[in-house]
Amino acid sequence: MIGLLLPFCLAAATPYVERVLPDGLTVVAVEDHAVPLVTVEIGVKNGSMTESPAYNGLSHLYEHMFFKGNQALPNQEAYLARTRELGMVFNGTTEEERVNYFFTTTSDELLPSLGMMRDAIEWPLFDAGELGREKQVVIGEIDRDEAQPGYHLEKALRERLWRQPSYKDPLGNRATVGSATPAMMREIQKRYYVPNNSILVVAGDVEPRAVFGEVEKLFAGWARAPDPFVAHPVPTEPPLDHSSVVVVPQPVETVSLVFEWQGPSASDGGLPATYAADLLTAMIDLPSSGFQRDLVDSGACVRADLSWYTQAHVGPIAFALEAAPNRVDACLSAAVAELPRLARADTFTDRDFRDGVTRLTVERAAEQEAPSAYAHILTFWWSTTSLSYYDGYVDQMRRVDRAAIAAYLRRYVLGRPYVFGAMLAPQLVRGGLDRAHFERLLGLSTTEASR
């Protein structure tokens, strides 16, 4: 019993202190003196959710420009020299609903690290020469992604699942990135890089009161601005109105099969479904689950998982399968039969629910183990949901029951329009595993699937 309760005790604690400054900047301090390191991370509610086709990929390009010249360090060479002086590890990421930047160094360098973060976020130069060079770096990332077979399946699914696919594509496209200007970078900064649209996390060998005092002094000149999502709201994604099939020939050995649906949003209206979505994933991912027995242990599929991606603005649900070339039909048929079973009252036992909650609880506790990684977790949840959502996550999971699982599946999956994608070797497509074959297997009419 002690072993079962321990994870819940770990997850119950909130190992950070939060304060919102007068300018709207959310500041979070995570105190952990295990090692003399500190991570300074800033997260901004930006990313592809803010990008029309004309701006698609520019949040990603902006992320690269963050580590270039600014008012204090006039070019990239000076910037990199300063990171070496401070012994920094640094990076950034761009997603659909968050862009984040972080420095990790020794805790005695906290103040200069905070200063570097302030200079980069408040006073970037967007030098035309540096921007031109960085465009090629980002285009190189696009080239590398396009060289991966999975990229083409993801792209094909995205373009069919969303009426406005640029808002779900953080990587961006080559033409848009190539035509970016310093003025476009400044527009992104003016619109989104404001304190009331940002979170600053300081995690590691620090004392929270000192952190708040220094941040308030250093960032005092960062001017609050209007909420960017009032003047520039994220477009509402229309519901998918029909199912469709796409086949993507690629030089691969196995066959990837994916169903995608438009799932819940992590906002007030969709909150109950988000907890059911995550607990369902945790339960079926357990190696002993009936889902794994039916689809993988049976030999029908090589791999199977059902997941939802946490998003404030319509997160996708993905039912991903991998099959041997000679077992494609068996895998797909077994998968289609498995979905309605998940909504039955007798599918999951009380033990399944307990094991699923325990797994999620341990995962939440493990996220707190390394302050540098925990900073990334906190900026993600703040950007896509809220810190209160994250704090209450495990308690909400304990409230999920069979009815909630069934309601989630019936609202978003069972009988709902979807996009189905298959990625397989060209010779298999020529041998009959083409779009018409999958449409027949899924019971879709040619008219419906081709709309």
Image: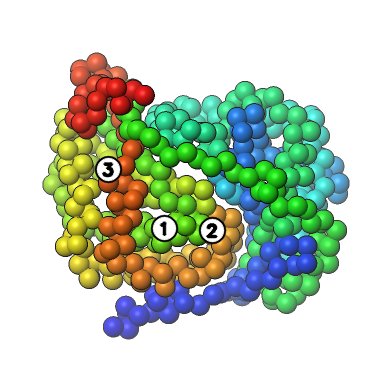
First in residue order: circle 1 vs circle 2: 1
Q: Nearer the viewer, residue 441 or 271?
A: 271
Q: Which residue is mark 2?
A: 385
> SS class of the residue under badge 1?
helix
Q: Amino acid at mark 3?
A: Gly
Q: Amino acid at mark 2?
A: Thr
> SS class of the residue under badge 3?
loop
First in residue order: circle 3 vs circle 1: 1
Q: Amino acid at mark 1?
A: Thr
Q: Are marks 1 and 2 in contact (CB under 8 Å)?
A: yes
Q: Residue at x 31, y 57 (%)?
A: 407
The picture places residue 398, in percent across and down from the top left corner, at 35, 71
Q: Nearer the viewer, residue 258 or 261?
A: 261
Q: Residue at x 75, y 52 (%)?
A: 226
Quadrant location, the C terminus? top left
Taking the image as shown, residue 369 lies to the left or right of residue 450, namely right
Query: What colour scheme does the image use?
Result: rainbow
Q: Which residue is mark 1?
A: 274
Please say if 270 is above or below 415.
below
Q: Residue at x 66, y 52 (%)?
A: 44
The picture places residue 114, in percent across and down from the top left corner, at 76, 60
> SS class of the residue under badge 2?
loop
Quarter-wise, where is residue 19 in the image? bottom right
Q: Residue at x 77, y 44 (%)?
A: 190
Quarter-wise, where is residue 382 in the image? bottom right
Res 415 label: 3
